[in-house]
Each structure stands twice: as C-alpha cells, then as structure tokens.
Amino acid sequence: MQRHADTDLVVVSNRLPITLTETPSGYTYKPSAGGLATALSGLKEANFLWIGWPGAVVEEGVQKHIEEDLLREHRCMPVFLSNEQVEQFYNRFCNGVIWPLFHYLPEYTDFELVGWNYYQEVNELFANAVAEVAPPDATIWIHDYHLMLLPQLLRERLPDARIGFFLHIPFPSSEVYRLLPVRRQILTGLLGADVVGFHTYDYARHFRSACMRVLGYDAKPDMVDADGRPVQLVVAPIGIDPDRFVELARSTRTQMRLERLRSQFRSRRVILGVDRLDYSKGLTHKLRAFARFLQRHPEWRNRCVFLQVAVPSRTGVQRYKQLRREVEELVGHVNGLYSSVEHTPVHFLFQNVSPTTLSALYQLGDVCWVSSIRDGMNLVSQEYVVSQLEGDGVLVLSEFAGAAQILDGAILVNPWNVDQMADALREALEMPIEEREARLARMREKIYSNSSKAWAEKFLGIIRKHTEEVRAVPDRINLLRVLEDLTQACVQAEKRYFLLDYDGTLRPFAPTPQEAVPTPQVRELLNALASLPNTYVYVVSGRDQETLESWLGDLPIGLCAEHGVLFRDVGSREWQRLVHVSTDWFETVRPIMESYAQMTPGALVEKKSAALAWHFRRCDPDFGQWQANELAFHLASVVSNLPVEVIHGHKVIEVRAQGANKGALVRHLEKRWERDDFIFAIGDDATDEDMFQALQGRGWCCRLGRGPSAAAYYLERQADVMRVLNHLVRAVQGSPAEQVQG
Ligand code: GDG
C-alpha cells in the first residue's frame, strides 16, 4: 500500500461510513450517512482518507479486491477483522467493559476484561494500517472508545503526525473510571494524542482528573502535562447537519408518509421516542413514567400515544437480549392496564426505520422524549428540533444527556425521578403554543450555530493550532531524530561523561519517594555504561546522600546528592561538599512548611543538608497544588531577604541555599574536561535547568518533554531515556545497535 502524500487528513473510526454486505453475487457497498460521515462531508480537506472496519468479515482471498474498490470509489481503507476479533474486541471489550463503565454502570461491566488482549491487538492492527498509508506529518483524527490505545501507538510510529482524538461517549467521573483494571493503559493510550475532545466540560474535567489521580500528571483546566508533552483538552459538542434534515422533512415522500401517519393517529397527541435499544437510553424509565402519567392523568388516557422506535443494537450480546425482554414485558404491562378496544397507549417498534419514516415521525411527534440515563450527546434530540417544520413540538430531555447542555429550550428531567418525568409529559402536552414555539426557536438557533460541519472545522482547527504552537517552541530537537549523530559523537570520543538525573529520568515517578528504588534494568544500564572505556557516569539527584549511597553506592559511578551539594566521585567512597552554605534560615522556613503539611493530608517536609522540601505527591492533586501555591506565595514574602531560592519541582516546593544547585557539579567537573570529550546531561524538571545552563551550550543536553528549556534536545517519554542510553552502550561496545524508534 502506497503512502497517500495528497492526504490532508486521515479519519479513523471503528466503522467505515460504508457498510459492506455479502450477497450471492458478491459484495455490495452501501454508504451509511451517520452523523460523523455527514459532519465530515463538507470539509475543506477534500482529500481525506477514512480508515476503519467495513462492517463485515471478509475472506482473505477477496480482501485485496475490496480494498482497491473502497479506496478508488470512496477513499476508504478497510481494516479487516476476523469473527473472533469482532466478537472479542467489539462485543466483549468495547461493549462489555468500556461502554457500560463509561455510562456509569459498573454492575454491567465485565471486570474479568475478557477481550482486552483483542482490544490491544485490534488497536495495533489499526495503527499499522494508518502508519502504512499516512504521510509522516499527516493530521489524524481518531474517533471513539474503540480506539483509545491508538493515539499512543501512532505517536510511536509517526512522531511528527498531528493527532486528535474525539470521545463520543461520556468520560465518567474519576471515581468510576478508576475501577477499570487497565485504567493506566487506556489513559496513556489517549494521551498519545495532541488534542483530546469531548462533548461537554464535565467529561473533559473528569478526564483531566483521571490523568492527575491515576497517572499523577499535572494539569491545567484545559491541558494535561503528559510527561512534559502538553495535551490540549477541548470541549466541542457535536452537531448535526440541519439543512439535510430540513430538506428530508420537506421532501414529497416524507410529506406523503406524514399524511398517512397523521390520518392513522388523527386526534391523538403523539409522544415520540427514538433510541437504539440500549440500557443507557433509559427505555424502562420511560415506560414506568408513562404508566405513572396515565395513572395520574386519566383525562389523557385515550388522547395520547407513546410511540417508541427501538432500533435493534448489539443483538448478539446477552445484556441487550435481556433488556429487550424487560422492555417488551413493560410495554405489555402498560398496554394491559390502559388499552381499550379502540386505543393502545404504547406503540413499540423494535426495528430500523427508513430515513423518510424517521423524518415523518419527527414531524408527527408533539413531544419528543429522550430519557437517557447517560448519553454522550444524543443526536435524536437535535434532529427532532430541526425536523419540526411547524415549529411547535416540545422536547423532554434527560439532564444526563450531553445535549441538555446545549438545548436550553427543553424540559429537563431526571430519568430516575418517575414523578418528575410524568409531570414533564403533562407540562409538555399542555404547554401553550407561544411557549412551545419560543422554546423550539431558541433550540433551533443553537443547533444552526453549531452544525456538524462547524464542529468538525473547529476541532480540526484546534489540532492545527495546538500542534503549531507546540512545535513552535524554539530550537528544541527530538533526540531520537539525531540519534545517529549522538551515537557517532559518543563512539568516537576519547572520554565520555554522563550526568544523569534520577527521579523522572532514569526511573519513573512512584507514589512515594521511597518506592522509586532502582529497577534491575536501571542498575544494569548504569553498570554497563560505567564499564565502557574512559566513561564517567554521575547520577545527579535532589535525593539525600544516604538514599543514593544505599541504592547505587555499590556501582562504579559518581553520585551527586541534594542538587549538587554533596558529591562522591567515580572510584571514591568518600563524600565531599561541593557547596558551603549557611542553613540558619531553616528555623524560619521549617515551621511554615510544617504548618502547611499539617493542613494538607499526604504532604510531608523533607530536611536535606542545604534545603527543605515540601512534597505533595501523595496529596489530592487539586488540593495539593492549591496548598503548594499558597505555600509558595507565603514563602516568597518571608524569604525575600534570605540567601535562598524557592524552586517548584515535580510535586515539590523546595527552598534551598543559593548556589546549591546541579550547576555546582558541572562547575566542579569542567576543570577535567577536554575539548573533544563527549558530555551528555539529561533531566526532567526545573532543577535540571541549572545543570544545562552551567554547561553553556557544551555537550548534549536533553530535557524530557517539549516545553521551554535550556537543553537543546528533548525526549517525549521517560522510557525513551533507557532506550537511548542502552543504544549508546551497545554502540560503544560495538555490538549491533538495537532499533530505537520515535
Ligand atoms: C453515540 C453516543 C452521541 C436512530 N434510529 C434510526 C436512525 N437513528 C439515527 C438517529 C441518530 C443516530 O441514529 C443515533 O444517535 P444518538 O446520538 O442518539 O446515539 P448513539 O448511537 O448512541 O451515538 C451519543 C453520538 O455517538 C454522536 O457523538 O450523540 O451520545 O452514544 O442520528 O437519526 N436512523 C435511521 N433509522 C432508524 O431507525 N435511518
């Protein structure tokens, strides 16, 4: 498969907007005009390529042929899945784990995670398919919960791509999300994107909170700091194409259909429901509330019908079969109680209806009733509003649907409150015409101003803008891009010096500082590096002398503790002071830190020989950050006349003696360095900047993350540090270099 250099945009979703059906005479392709397909059809990026599953399992022999057809005729590239993959990935994991949990139904969630391996496998398949055809700097827009690992998998394969992800379903509160056994993997997968979009602010806020609580990342309200890489959060509620619905509503076929329906229902008012038969849509809640309404308002019993279209969905899944039985039983129950010879109150259609019929039903409905217990957005409510050509229908809408945040002319209901829903039906049926028209007009205006096309353009615009801004950070180069030069410089040098930060650089952060013990891999790497000829390795850390000595003291490396204050040289067991400072100020600063620690559960004060540190890694992320800001503000006024500096590290506020920083080690070592020596310094936070600055452009300085730094190079992830260093070890040893990819 060739790369599509003319492709401005690659759209990836589980399903293609084309449905493939096997017939006796071969395969047929039917475009499915879903909301997403319509949203993207009017985009400026005419050349976009759509990658996804075509909706049918295809024998290997004909795959090539179908691929060519789809590409030529529809600019779609199929990812073929086996029966087993469809069952395990789609039915078991996507719809048996993610769908229920993200709709706040842990009791429906299969926590055994059957299908998780397939979820990973299918996401890999998609990643390979995209990487094969997308230009390296393509804009890639990934959709929905089926492909949440894909952003990170693509970032590894296409480091220069601009990746956006949009979640169409709710993102649950972090209290629910954290139940998920693979919660870290899913978040890490999503954070591979440059931009992650949601329908509502609530979903974005839940996601941000999950990143902070589950991964320990820092975040601003609209940005997550993913190991130094800013991931933009976007609230972009999806819209519909109103013109298309109006056109369909006006068409002769629809009007004829509407006439027939009107004569069938004559003087009865119609309460309409249109939903996939899914437990998130609150169908049983509607039926109970409708029964309550009829019970309380006998005057309406023969004057209205509740017409519910329930579109068959995921019919192979046990939970959905059960739901169908439950709903049908309830329909029977209500009709049994309130039917008469002439009148049946509930009309239940378990079937797909044609677009024409759907449009006619939208016009027929005096009330449209959406009672989802959770719904990412809900497009039916928007479609109903614009299809109401006469402009006097009433929308009764669940406050748990994303749409409730846009459609402010609806009567909002809590589907769990049966009485309130019953009252809302009465209010809707008896609402004066002027109010109905005014409410509908208000909603129509909202829908027109947020059409699906405007939505897609807004989201793509944000991907472009954000990636431009991030890439515009001056002059920093991805170290992986210059790996060959780095390797060559390292191999050819007479002498090599490595200045390596520990926490967050050699070792990922752990929940408590004591848990970040060096792994066997870290120790092996340091040993291998230090055993290279003429190679001097220093671990430069904010940690105290005892910890470094006990963790790394047996290795043939140099150690520098407390950000450059204490030093043990390569080949020596003795520690020396690099910086001589007064610590008289401890007695002023320590009580302030202690009092803030007492007020902040999880915070602790650490005393070092030339610094005091206030750690808040184990605190509630929001409260910890808040208290840290307060403390820093408080300290600023107290320390202004003291010989100290206040440093904001990763989840730590540190007050330390002036001059006691990692630059001290550079100043100590530089006397030994000769012009052609290879110097490599790497770190991940503000305290490493002193080391980079002291090097004054000499050697290879690398800081994790793309933000501003004195280091000319960056790596995106902590795991890359190990890969690069191992690569250098192998290269100097002369063994074949391991493949290191971006
Ligand atoms: C997910 C999220 C979010 C329905 N019945 C028939 C039919 N439909 C069409 C409707 C509408 C679509 O299906 C349903 O969309 P919803 O938004 O209501 O719900 P989900 O399918 O659950 O969609 C949801 C959406 O993604 C988009 O982000 O809003 O929250 O769950 O367009 O018109 N179409 C036809 N016959 C039917 O019988 N032709």
Image (cartoon, rainbow, N blue to C red):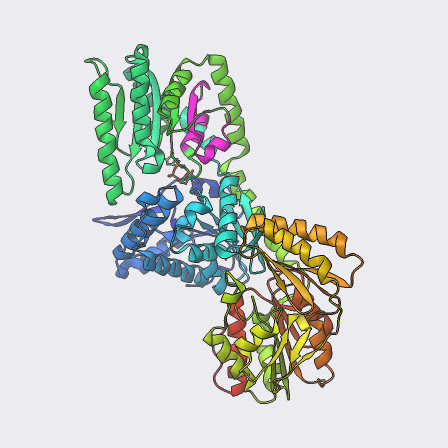
Residue 508 percent location from the top left of the image: 52, 66
Q: Quick one: 674 or 23, which is closer to the camera? A: 674
Residue 527 in percent (x, y) is at 52, 82
Q: Residue at x 45, y 57 (%)?
A: 189
Seen at 78% across and 63% down, the residue is 643
Q: Give the residue at the far right of this rendering.
A: 641
Q: Is residue 311 above or below residue 512?
A: above
Q: Is residue 697 visible?
A: no
- Residue 556, compared with residue 132, is above or below; it is below
Q: Residue at x 49, y 64 (%)?
A: 156
Above or below for 48 versus 292: below
Residue 487 lies, with reference to residue 398, above or below; the image says below
| Residue 236 visible at all | yes
Residue 411 image point, x, y percent: 45, 23
* Image side of residue 533 versus residue 4, left or right: right
Q: Is residue 57 magenta?
A: no
Locate residue 674, reporting x and y percent.
71, 86
Segment tinted magenta in the rendering: 380-408
Residue 393 is a magenta residue: yes
Give the image quarter of residue 546. bottom right
Pick the residue in front: 507 or 545: 545
As drawn, is 132 to the left or to the right of 712?
left
Q: Quadrant of ligand 1?
A: top left
State the quadrant of the N terminus.
Answer: bottom left
The foreground one among 641 and 191 is: 641
